[in-house]
Amino acid sequence: MRLSRLARGILGAVTGVILLVIYLPLMVVLVNSFSTSTSLVWPPPGLTLEWWGRAFQSEGALEAVLTSVQIALIATLVSLVLGTLISLALQRFAFFGREAVSLLVILPIALPGIITGIALNNAFRTILGVQLSIATVIVAHATFCIVTVFNNVIARLRRLGTSYEEASADLGAGLWTTFRLVTFPQLRSALLAGGLLAFALSFDEIIVTTFTAGAGVKTLPIWILDNLFRPSQAPIVNVIAVVLVLVSIVPIYIAQRIAGAEKVSR
Amino acid sequence: MTVDTASPGQRIPVPPHRDTLARRGSISLSRHPRLRLTLMLSAPLLWLGLIYIVALAALLITALWTVDSFTGTITRSWTLDNIITVVTGSLYQTVTVRTVGVALLVTLIDILVALPIAFFMAKVASPRWQRILVIAVLMPLWASYLVKAYAWRSVLSQNGIFEWLVAPFGGETPGYGLPATVITLAYLWLPYVILPVYAGLERVPDSLLEASGDLGGKTWATLRLVVLPMIWPAIIAGSIFSFSLSLGDYITVNIVGGANQMLGNLVYTNVGAANNLPLAAAIALIPIVIIFGYLAVVRRTGALENL
């Protein structure tokens, strides 16, 4: 198959249009963060920097960002450990119930968030008798983040094969030494990619969070939902969204650089 | 300063391994792969099993209980009433059909949009552009889900940019309702569909496409007979995301859906305002059954390895 110049051009144009539609709402958010109007009027009647100034002084928002980062970091760490263990087990061993285990890993993400949410809410409160708190949010988030780590690591393990590990063992290295010096370095970028996705997933999660967060726990999405429909706060929400998108360029770029450097050919 | 140089012919003896506890443990572990497997699996399985499976099972059991209408507490007497209400109630049937319809439409739109852009990214763009495009597709994922849904509320409002763009051509905004819900959900889950399809297309070697061309395959024939079967699992994998995420959504429909309700709204009001967890659990069974059915159908395609 050789694509004609015309076909390439059309594909390129379609891609351009899709990207335009993807970025149109984000542009609206950006412009609205400078708008003097607090309702959704287009084009904006005037421009102001007031919201940007107020956003950086909004204690509620800053605290919510810190809470979300804290939750996302711990949930990501837990899912990195559990996801790596489970993908090593599934890739390197054949055992009875292997398929059931792999289904079990994807289930928390394949089932809609509201189901995971009320199931965990019910389990925490009525079965375990645990008070909802920040810890219950972390447990819930880690549960559905495992799958992103698992997917990245198992794909890498499939490609790697076991010859390096066998060579290491033949040369006298113990299991732990082999993992530390041979397996782990080869998994590092897959772990980074999986961890990054897990972090993003946890950071933006609202539905499961709503059902598992204690009364005092305000993650950023919960804070945003509280303030989205308040006319005096909605523009501040826009500012925070813009800042998040800008900040996200850094980790995505790093992950892409690492993935690009490792790619051999297509 | 002394430099330790071994003259040729004179070998440095390999020091004997110290007989430490760690070493013995390592040796016995490598001799017993079953033990190794058990140790590796126990932590994640305990986590997923104890937390998730127990929670799901408890939810199913709760669906068989009732709420005392006076005290508002859950009575642990076994009854099928909730399930019967959900299966036969016309409200639940209407909402189920609406929700599944929305989820299917969203999935279809996402796949149709994802295919050309993923193909361009994987097979046409130069490596440099490939990287830029992946970043461009990934970046919106970091803008909050709520903010994006709210942005669409802004875009589609009566004074919004959509109206402003199409008014000169005699068009008007669809306003808030089911079309707006479908548009917004399709927008929100699009990256989750593009990424697996792109990854699937990247795994199709260029040489196969060339071989098909050399053997006389026209573009469409190659796409249909060579590319599509290879990326089918990836498409299904993407569809699991968009379908399942749409099936449980209740926030987007609140923001742009007008007065329409989806299954998620029914569950949410019964957990919260109506304080009827058993009925909420019974309603939640509908998406659980649908998703399990979907997973069972697509399991054979190998899509679950492509998530």
Image: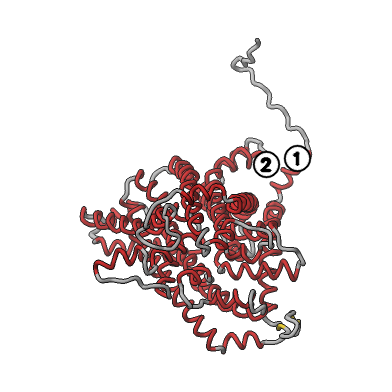
Q: Nearer the viewer, residue A256 or B292?
A: A256
Quarter occupied by residue A214: bottom right
**How many numbered tags mark residues here?**
2
Q: Are marks 1 and 2 on the same chain?
A: no
Dot 2, crowdedness within 10 Å: few (<14), some or many (≥20)? few
Estimate the x, y position of residue A167 in percent, counting from the top left: 59, 39
Residue B199 in sight: no
User: Residue under mark 1: which chain is it in?
Assistant: B
Question: Does B158 sit above or below residue B278?
Answer: above
Estimate the x, y position of residue B229 in percent, counting from the top left: 38, 64
Q: According to the image, label 2 marks what residue?
A: A176
Question: Does A167 sit above or below residue B119?
Answer: above
Query: Do the numbered discs 1 and 2 sit on residues whose CB atoms are within 8 Å?
Result: yes
User: Residue under mark 2: which chain is it in?
Assistant: A
Which residue lies most toward the top here?
A: B1
Q: Is residue B81 left or right of residue B177?
A: right
**Residue type at the position of mark 2:** Trp
Q: Secondary structure at mark 1?
A: helix
Quarter occupied by residue A257: top left
Q: Nearer the viewer, residue A255 or B253?
A: B253
**Residue type at the position of mark 1:** Ala
Q: According to the image, label 1 marks what residue?
A: B22
Residue A116 in sight: yes
Residue A207: mark: none
Question: Does B22 sit above or below residue B135?
Answer: above
Q: Secondary structure at mark 2?
A: helix
